[in-house]
Amino acid sequence: MGKKFIVEIKDHCPSWNTLYAGKHWAVRKKMADEKHELVFWSVKASKRPKLPFKGVVVAFYEIWFKDKRRHDFDNLLLKMYNDGLVHAGVFDDDDSKHLVCGGIYPRTGMSEDKIIIRMEEI
């Protein structure tokens, strides 16, 4: 295994349902831009290895929710955070040549809303 990197993003992870619930494209674009910026600054504030990763990266997503309701892992909108990682220079692209998903783990009843992404070069 190669380089490892963990980034914590203090944000509430939206669902695909929320994104497409009658929202105008401009509202979705604004949301995406805000998420990209948030990820960018979260990466810059983290202790990180020399980036970008050059090999394939496996990412594990731990999604913290303050609420106690159940969340479908396949309905969590991680695309904007992956795009933000590209924007921050963590890897060159978020396609399958550069990034694979190792798992998505929603956690409910936590102390805060946040997304923890653990990445490892393979």
Image: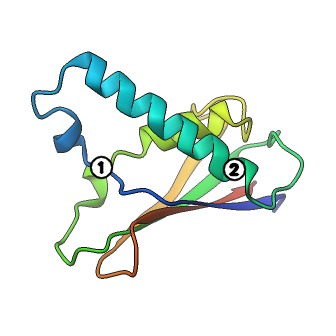
Scheme by which the image is coloured: rainbow
| Residue depicted at x 24% and y 41% | 16
For residue 2, above or below residue 57: below
Label 2 crowding class (10 Å Cα cut-off): few <14, some 14-19, many 20+?
Answer: many
Query: Residue 43: which numbered mark, if any?
Result: 2
Query: Residue 112, image x and y in percent?
Result: 40, 73
| Residue depicted at x 45% and y 64% | 114
Residue at label 1?
A: 14
For residue 112, above or below residue 101: below
Dot 1 lies on which element?
loop
Q: Is residue 75 left or right of residue 52?
A: left
Tell me the kind of residue under disc 1.
Pro
Q: Quadrant of the N terminus?
A: bottom right
| Residue depicted at x 74% and y 35% | 89
For residue 110, above or below residue 47: below
- The mark tally for this picture is 2
Query: Residue 71: which numbered mark, if any?
Result: none
Quarter assignment of residue 118: bottom right
Dot 2 lies on which element?
helix
- Judging depth in this view, the residue of 60 and 12 nearest the camera is 12
Quarter assignment of residue 32: top left
